[in-house]
């Protein structure tokens, strides 16, 4: 019981921090077998938002992945096809357009 109360206390503390949101992050890479590989290959050079806003077919994702590998993205050749499948499944052309999260800052 004490461990449970301690966990709840941490949740309350973190929830009070500026910028903390219980809402899912719309710029996070979706869960899946290749999520960590995508994070490693893609977010070393840029934020995940660059990936999640894309709406590409499999051929275009293939070109994009190959281009990024040429530019230095860390990706084992054995993971290439699975990463392309992950990206083309999660961010296809028919998916609804990406909507950027609104800033909590007020304009003065």
Image (cartoon, rainbow, N blue to C red):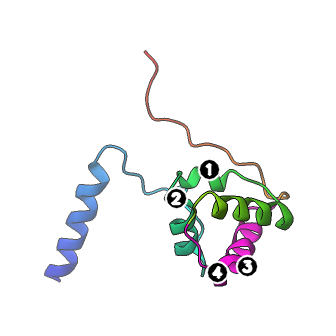
Residue indicated by mark 1: 50
Q: CA distance from mark 4 to mark 1?
A: 20 Å
Q: Residues within 10 Å of mark 2 (few under 14, many from 20)?
A: some
Q: Quadrant of the C terminus?
A: top left
The 10 Å Cα crowd at callout 4, few under 14, some 14 to 19, many 20 or more, is few
Verify CB contact (< 8 Å) between mark 3 and mark 2: no
**Region in magenta:** 74-92
| Distance in Å between CA atoms under marks 3 and 2 | 18 Å
Q: Earlier in the sequence, mark 4 or mark 1?
A: 1
* Disc nearer the start of the sequence (2/4): 2
Q: Which residue is mark 3?
A: 81
- Give the class, few, some or many, for how many residues have Cα within 10 Å of label 1's Cα (few <14, many ≥20): few
State if disc 1 and disc 4 touch (CB < 8 Å).
no
Q: Quadrant of residue 2?
A: bottom left
N-terminal-most mark, 3 or 2: 2
- Residue density around tag 3, few if under 14, some if 14–19, many if 20 or more, within 10 Å: few
Closer to viewer: mark 1 or mark 3: 3
User: Could you tell me how many numbered marks the image carries?
Assistant: 4
Q: Which residue is mark 2?
A: 43
Task: Report, in whole angstroms, how far the alpha carbon at label 1 lies from the one at label 3.
Answer: 20 Å
Secondary structure of residue under mark 2: loop
Does 75 sit left or right of 83 as displayed? left
Queried whether the magenta region covers residue 76, the answer comes back as yes
Q: Secondary structure at mark 3?
A: helix
Q: How far across and down, in percent of the image, does residue 65 sit?
A: 70, 64
Q: Is residue 26 magenta?
A: no
Against 80, residue 87 (above or below) is above
Q: Which residue is located at x 53 percent, y 51 percent?
A: 46
Quarter of the figure with residue 38: bottom right
Disc 4 marks which residue? Answer: 79
């Amino acid at each position: 019981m004490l461990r449970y109360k301690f966990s709840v206390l941490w949740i309350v503390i973190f929830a009070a921090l500026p910028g903390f949101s219980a809402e899912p992050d719309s710029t996070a890479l979706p869960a899946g077998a290749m999520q960590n590989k995508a994070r490693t290959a893609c977010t070393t050079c840029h934020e995940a938002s660059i990936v999640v806003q894309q709406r590409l077919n499999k051929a275009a994702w293939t070109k994009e992945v190959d281009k990024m590998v040429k530019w230095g993205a860390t990706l084992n050749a054995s993971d290439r096809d699975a990463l392309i499948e992950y990206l083309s499944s999660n961010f296809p052309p028919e998916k609804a357009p990406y909507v950027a999260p609104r800033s909590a800052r007020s304009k003065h």
